[in-house]
Image (tube, coloured by chain):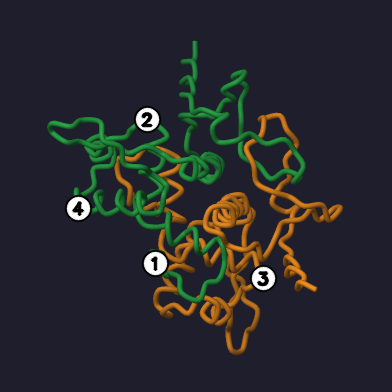
Chain colours: A green, B orange
Amino acid sequence: VLRRDYDGQDCAVARTLEIVGERWTLLIVRDAFLGRNRFEQFQESLGIARNVLTDRLNRLVDEGILERVRYSERPERFEYRLTPKGRDLRLTLTALRQWGEEHLGEAPRRTLQSVADGSRIVAGLVPADAEVLAADEVELVAVAPPASPE
Amino acid sequence: VLRRDYDGQDCAVARTLEIVGERWTLLIVRDAFLGRNRFEQFQESLGIARNVLTDRLNRLVDEGILERVRYSERPERFEYRLTPKGRDLRLTLTALRQWGEEHLGEAPRRTLQSVADGSRIVAGLVPADAEVLAADEVELVAVAPPASPE
């Protein structure tokens, strides 16, 4: 069920923010891209109340951004994996990250690279007929810390 | 003053969301891109409480995303304009919009085009050495409604 939090805002930006604009939601998606996929991993990473995390995870599953997969039968345990719809949020997360690095003085800690050849990948505004990479064609890698001055 | 809403989240995504992740904030920025720049225009467009709008506008000015410019002396009145830092949120907004169009079935209502030649522009993941357009080299235009069936 789509909550019409931004009622009257007939716009794809508003509709998207209804789903991913809740507090913590995009950080959960970011964590999933970093390989975290179990409740305890998200909880440890984000340090948020368990009921809030449960609510956000359920919402992400309801919206088809994460899927809930059983990985243990006894005891029954589940993990969360990004769906293709979820992985397509890579572009949005990359745009947010780049803005923070450029305008908030955040030192780059991770960068995107091409899975195929390891070349560096960025988010950008390009002609509609330009060749762009799909979310699955890129991966996050740690940026090497700057060398200490001699 | 940077509020550390996502304390412990040492990451450019989290830092960016501390600033633009508050409810309504990105819709105010979207409205500014659509040419709205006065308090009453934002209020009419968003339909939010005036105290919330005041809070968000002040925060955006504090963070250097909007600038407050006096346009009338008597009575004294101000309008809000995107700074270069604010205009650089174009990429993030475009990524959010595209995701909504692709995954939520939102019909495209606006598209980006090149100011120079009117060609269609999208947000995408591209090699770091690809030619990308700056925020000021693109403009939003309305998408023509689909033709009625004959």
Query: Marks 4 and 3: in contact by CB < 8 Å?
Result: no
**Looking at the image, residue B129 lies above or below residue B81:** above
**Looking at the image, residue B27 lies above or below residue A84:** below
Residue at the disc numbered 4:
A51
Q: Nearer the viewer, mark 3 or mark 1?
A: 1
| Chain for numbered disc 3 | B
Q: Nearer the viewer, mark 2 or mark 3?
A: 2
| Chain for numbered disc 1 | A
Residue at the disc numbered 3:
B35
Give how far apart the Cα atoms at labels 1 and 4 are.
Answer: 19 Å
Quadrant of the rendered structure where residue B105 is? bottom right
* Mark 2 residue type: Gly
Q: Secondary structure at mark 2?
A: loop
Q: Tell me where residue A45 appears, x and y as whole percent.
A: 28, 37
Query: Marks 4 and 2: in contact by CB < 8 Å?
Result: no
Residue at the disc numbered 1:
A3
Give how far apart the Cα atoms at labels 2 and 4 are.
Answer: 22 Å
Query: Marks 4 and 1: in contact by CB < 8 Å?
Result: no
Q: Residues within 10 Å of mark 2 (few under 14, many from 20)?
A: few
Q: Secondary structure at mark 4?
A: helix
Residue at the disc numbered 2:
A35
Left or right of B18, for residue B107: right
Residue at the (64%, 83%) spot, across then down: B72
* Mark 3 residue type: Gly
Q: Nearer the viewer, mark 1 or mark 4?
A: 1
Q: Residues within 10 Å of mark 1 (few under 14, many from 20)?
A: few
